[in-house]
Amino acid sequence: MGDKDVSSATVARLPNYLRSVMDLAAEDVANVSSDRLANHAGVNPATLRRDLASLGVTGTRGVGYDIKYLTFQISVILGVNQEWPVAVVGAGNIGRALTSYQGLASRGFPVRAVFDIAEDKIGTEVSGLVVEPLSNVSHRIPELNVTVGVIATSADAAQSVAQLLIDAGIQSILNFTADSLDVPEGVTVRRVDLATELQILSFYQQRESAVADGTGIPLKPKP
Amino acid sequence: MGDKDVSSATVARLPNYLRSVMDLAAEDVANVSSDRLANHAGVNPATLRRDLASLGVTGTRGVGYDIKYLTFQISVILGVNQEWPVAVVGAGNIGRALTSYQGLASRGFPVRAVFDIAEDKIGTEVSGLVVEPLSNVSHRIPELNVTVGVIATSADAAQSVAQLLIDAGIQSILNFTADSLDVPEGVTVRRVDLATELQILSFYQQRESAVADGTGIPLKPKP
DNA sequence: TAGATTGTTAATCGATTAACAATC
DNA sequence: TAGATTGTTAATCGATTAACAATC
């Protein structure tokens, strides 16, 4: 029953699949084919079927996937029905924005604590939370059942903050710094590096004008 | 002279290479081998050599890469020495944070304008800029030489805002909404979807406990 | 049964990397 | 020249997808 490996590419597509099947759920039919679902999600039908099968999610030959049940299954797999309390370290612009951002709470990721090391930030309020000293991390994380740590500090503090979070029991880290973190087995890190994203964009733009000039290297079209 | 395709995986590694070679530039040697550089960047040496070669960047056999010149070349390729003025659409939490975020300006991406459609946001100040009405996009983008547009609106406004930016001449878009954008050839989009990042993290955590229970599907170790 | 659609095998594609001839 | 290290070929790996037998 699907007890096979799940590739990280598959995992990255899951939220996309959930969105698509929820969209199609609005229609008045009970089943959906991999073809329609894949079209809506912008992937190849075989890829979608393979992805779902690798998670033990199956449809019915000749019929398709039961929309309601499929929605339920992906939801469970993604933990969408659970709450995953979040702690943010760093009460700078990014940290405060994330803490206030409704898009997270509404998707099951309520921010339960904000930490900072700077005296002038500690004690200030952000979206109903009081910024706590970094030294509180170790006891507050377990106390608040926080499962995800967000690092929104300067890059040079990132690694030590990560260690602090891990010591407090955190297994999932979202890293907003440019630093890439060294973490033990069992801890998952995702990095969101804004300046790097912009640098990639400017590379393409740079290249586009260079190609127009005839000076540059042509780009392989993105797949 | 390297007039070959550049894969998007290569592009994504470039900022990483630049960081590494700048780190190593601090040392008192003129050259660096692909081996040292790749180790520092956390990639395979052959991959690094291939990446650089695909961009027309070469070293010297038996010697390595000239650190200073290599830094210069990657900088030029990434456009690090230029300014890429940015416009942010959406003056909510994320939009305001990005506008205020020093990490962007210091890396050559100064935010030059912020737009919003909400009456109560227009006219307010964010980090020295006055929030402008969305209708200003078409003339302000060319006026301010903005090259990168950031969409930090609600998901349902994303596509129409993208069109507005493109009509104003924008070729590079950083999209913070959950919506995936339909854009014409020649426009590059990168998406940063925070809730999806968190969902991927919670998938792994979910799965980890499920495996501990013996109930779940074992995960393929991440490469 | 006839038609539809899955689950999966086998083929394809693209990216990574080992290995090595070229050459400083 | 001997040693080092590139640039690139060829092998490997993993992921995607076409194709189809299984089956509802």
Image: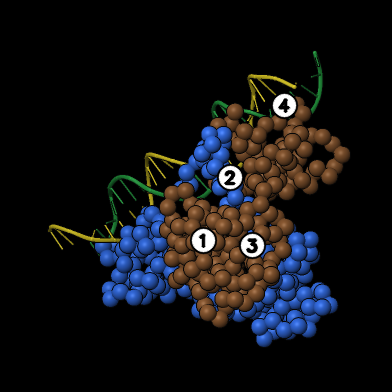
Chain colours: A brown, B blue, C green, D yellow
Mark number, residue A139: 1
Q: Secondary structure at mark 1?
A: helix
- Residue at 71% x, 31% y is A59
Determine the chain carrying the residue at label 2.
Answer: B
Are the residues flagged by discs 1 and 3 from a single subunit?
yes
Quadrant including the N terminus of chain B: bottom left
Determine the chain carrying the residue at label 3.
Answer: A
Are the residues flagged by discs 4 and 2 from a single subunit?
no
Q: CA distance from mark 1 to mark 4?
A: 52 Å
Label whose residue precedes the other's in the sequence (1 or 3): 3
Per the image, the residue denoted by label 4 is A61
Give the amino acid at mark 1.
Answer: His
Q: CA distance from mark 1 to mark 2?
A: 23 Å
Label whose residue precedes the other's in the sequence (1 or 4): 4
Q: Secondary structure at mark 4?
A: loop
Give the amino acid at mark 3.
Answer: Val
Per the image, the residue denoted by label 3 is A111
| x, y percent for residue C6 | 69, 30
Per the image, the residue denoted by label 2 is B206
